[in-house]
Structures are given as C-alpha cells and as structure tokens.
Amino acid sequence: MEMKDDVRYLLKPLTFTGRRFYAFIAALVGVIGLAGYAWYVQLTQGLGVTGMNDTTIWGLYISNFIFFIGISHAGIAISAAVRLASLDKYKPIMRMAEALTLASLLMAALSIVLDLGRPDRSVFLLTYFLERVGQSPLLWDITAVATYLVLSVTYLYFSLREDMAILKDEVGSWRGKLYTFLLPWYEEGEEETISRVAWWMAICILPIMVMVHTTVAWIFSLLPNRPLWFGAAAGPYFIVAAVSSGIATVIVIAVVLRYLFGWEEYIKPEVIKGLTNFMAITSLVYMYFMFAEHMTARFAAPAPEVRVSNAWFFGEFSLLFWGMFIFGIFIPTFALIINAIRSKEVNIKLSVAASVTIVLALWIKRVLIIVPTQTRPLMPMDYGLYIPTWVEWSLVAGTFAAAALIYTLFLKIFPIVEISEELH
Amino acid sequence: MKSLILLDALRFLGMSVGSSVAEWYAKTGVTGYIVLAMLVVPLTILMLAVLFVKPRRWHVTKIFFMLLFILYGGFVGGMYVMGVLLQLIM
C-alpha cells in the first residue's frame, strides 16, 4: 500500500531518533538501576528497611499498585468508546491509551511483588488457588488483573497486525524482521474478521475492567475491622478515580507526543477538549464520593471512623489531604469546568496542567486511603507511625521510570497511531 | 383459618430452605466463586464469539487462543521462575 507524506509523518517516532531520546532513556535506566539496588537491599535485609511496621503493614507499594491499576483503565475505556460508540474522533489516541494500559498493568503487578517480603513464595498463590479462592479477595484481584492483562495484550496485538503488515517494508531491517516474525499466518483481508474480534473483545473486556478495580477496592472494603475502608461504595469510588486519573494520563501523553512529533493536525484540539471535559466530570463525581465518605464517617458514625476522618482533616495527614484536595482536585476541576463554560476553545496548557495535578493528587489520595486507617487500629494499640524510607521512594520512582521506559520502547518499536485507519 | 395455616407452612418452608442455603454458603465460600464467575462469564462469551465470528478466518481464532494460552502460561510460569531466581538472592 503506497504511503502518502501526510501519513508518513505519523511514522516519525519510528524513523527519527534524536539525542534527547538517548538522554531520556539513560535517565530512566539510572532511576531503574537505583530501584534495583533498593530492591536488592530489601530482599537481603527484609522489609525492616522500609517504613512499614506492625500497625502500618501496607504503604507506598500498595498505594502505587492501586494507582497503576487505576490509570490502566483509560486504555480500554477509550478503545471501547471508539469501537462500540463510534466515537471516531478519539481514534488518533486509541493506541496511545492501549499502550498505557500495558505499561501500567505490568507496573501494578510489579508493585505487588515489591511489597512482598518473600516474593519467591508468591507461587503458593497458584498452588493453593482452588483452596483459597472462595474466601480471598486478594486472589480474586490477582485473577482479575491477570485476565485483564492477558486480554489487553491480545487486544493490542490484534490492533497492531494490519499496521505491522503495512509497515514491515517501510520501517527498516530489524523492525521489518520483527514485524514479519509477529505476523504468523497473515492474510490479506483478515482485517474484517479482526475488527469483529476486536469489537467482541471491547465488549467483554469492559466488565472485566470494572471487576478489576472493584476487586482491588474489595481488598480493603471487605475488612470490617478497618474504619473508613469497610463500606459498600468502595468499588464505584475506586473506579471513578481510576477513570479520572487514566484519562488525565492519556491527555498528558497525547499532548506531549503532539508537541514532540508535530502532530497538531492529527491530534486535533477537539480530542483534547473531549477528554478534558470527561476528566473534569469524573473528578467532580469523585469529589462527591469523597464528601459522601466523610459525611458517613463524621455524622453519628462509630468512634473509630471519626478518629480516622479526624486524622485526615485535622491530624498528621491534614496537610497532605487539604493540599491534595484543594490544589490537586478542587481547583483544577473547577478551572476546567469554568473554561469549558466560558470558552468553546480548549486551553491545552490548562488541560495538561490540570491533568498533571489530578494524577499527582490521586496518587497522594491512594496513600491517604491506605495509610491513615492503619495508623488508627481498632485494637488497643498505640497509634501507628509510617515514614517511608529511601528504599520505598526509590522503588516507587523505579516503577514510574520502568513504565515510562516500556512506553518509550513501545513507541520506538511499534506505531503509536493506527496507520491502517489513516490509509483507509 | 386455612390461609393462616398456609402462610405458616410457607414461612416454615422458606426458613428451612433459607437455613439450608445459609449452611451450604458458609461451608463453600460461594462468594468467591460468584466473583470468579463475573470474570469467567465475559471471558467465556468472548471465547465463544471468537470461535464463531464471521467472516471465518481460522488463523485469527487460532492466534487468539494461542495468545491466551501463552500469556496465561507466561504469567504462571513467570511467577514460578521469579520465585526460583529470587531464591538465589534471598
């Protein structure tokens, strides 16, 4: 298929590699190297090198896990919206979102492994699966995440087949060979069948996506002895945060790639506008859930619920909470809503700034979900204290660097936009 | 009078059934299986859809099931290999 110049420029990530790329990769590898050393220290000296203790048994790693599961939702949500609701204007960012799902799910799984003092024993999750799966929300979660990962990779692969077939003679020798290897039994005209398969996958992955984050929420909300965790609304609460943070991350990625590769005509402002408005609405819904949560905790609730809520509002977590809420969620959300009402044009800089703050705020919010409840146990113990150490911060930074590395390498190896869609 | 006896009989029947179900539920941990079903059902529907999708291209179906097998197997195998490798450090 002959490629016109206006499509060929979409191959820029594959055909051009500047110095900034190598510098970026070197920085990421450096951070991952530090994280690797931190993990070695943790494995050889035990979890005592972290800030976790008898009361606070879960900390940054689990918060990180929930965060990465959250942002993975954007990929399939956007893909499903395009395929099922025919929202074709979001086609340019479909694969960007799907690649984000892949990178973030892998880091979510890694975050759990990092939290284990004996990760070598995780194989017992498999050997005792049938015995424990009836009663263990953790096992439900692992099953859901594994299924979601398998189906997301399969979905991404099917969407890449036609592009690899088109590009295998255009993208240089090693990529061409890789694409040929990854195209077993390729037939001209298989696209119609693959399109139907992808449609079915979009339908079936959506309930699995909902179940993934619901089972993550149930790990906490099915514990009756944990104030502010135990409750019925945790599933929807987590899902709304997931969609909000996921869409925010996609906005940042789309704008960055748009700027780096000069794709202003390809990723039009309307795409950013639609994503931004949707993110603003989900953030508004999330604020409603936060209000409902603390209203329940403070109005005639049992004393332990009030204690935890007080820790958020007035205690040692108050600076983090109010900073996160006011500057991370409230102001950005209302700035976006006001901009949407007052102006027909999207303010891309505002969208990116709001997205970055919302992502950061929702990471902090996951820490606030995990840590304060544990520091106020129901049992007659002293209030716990949790101060993360350099090991935890290094490993968390390592997961972000690894996610960025996976995404950047994906960008370099495979087309990040759907070339076949542009040629049809 | 007859309706009162009937209502009482229905109530007794309901309680008998309910307590049997409650006993079975407590023993089997059926909640977990319901949750798993919420994952397995969409996956099963997907597998059936791919088997019968038209236009028929058997290699697409073959690739789909191969990917599922390889990826699930990779997940399980990866956990095992990770355990073995980490034992060398720990």
Image (spheres, rainbow, N blue to C red):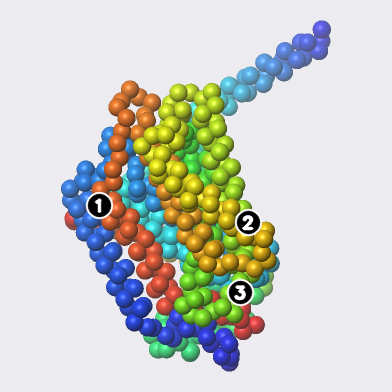
Name the mark nearer the viewer: 3 or 2: 2
Label 2: few (<14), some or many (≥20) within 10 Å?
few
Q: Residue A315 lies in what quarter of the image?
A: top left
Name the mark nearer the viewer: 1 or 2: 2
Q: Residue A3 lies in what quarter of the image?
A: bottom right
User: Residue A252, how many percent across, how many down?
Assistant: 49, 65
Residue behind mark 3: A268
Label 3, secondary structure: give it.
Answer: loop
Q: Are marks 1 and 3 on the same chain?
A: yes
At horizontal 49% and vertical 43% (from top left) the residue drawn is A217
Label 2, secondary structure: give it.
Answer: helix
Label 3: few (<14), some or many (≥20) within 10 Å?
some
Q: Is residue A163 left or right of residue A395?
A: right
Name the mark nearer the viewer: 1 or 3: 3
At horizontal 57% and vertical 85% (from top left) the residue drawn is A7
In three-dimensional space, the C-alpha distance between marks 3 and 2, rounded to whole angstroms, equals 21 Å
- Residue type at numbered disc 3: Lys
- Residue type at numbered disc 2: Ile
Evaluate whether residue B57 shows in this view.
no
Residue behind mark 1: A391
In three-dimensional space, the C-alpha distance between marks 1 and 3, rounded to whole angstroms, equals 42 Å
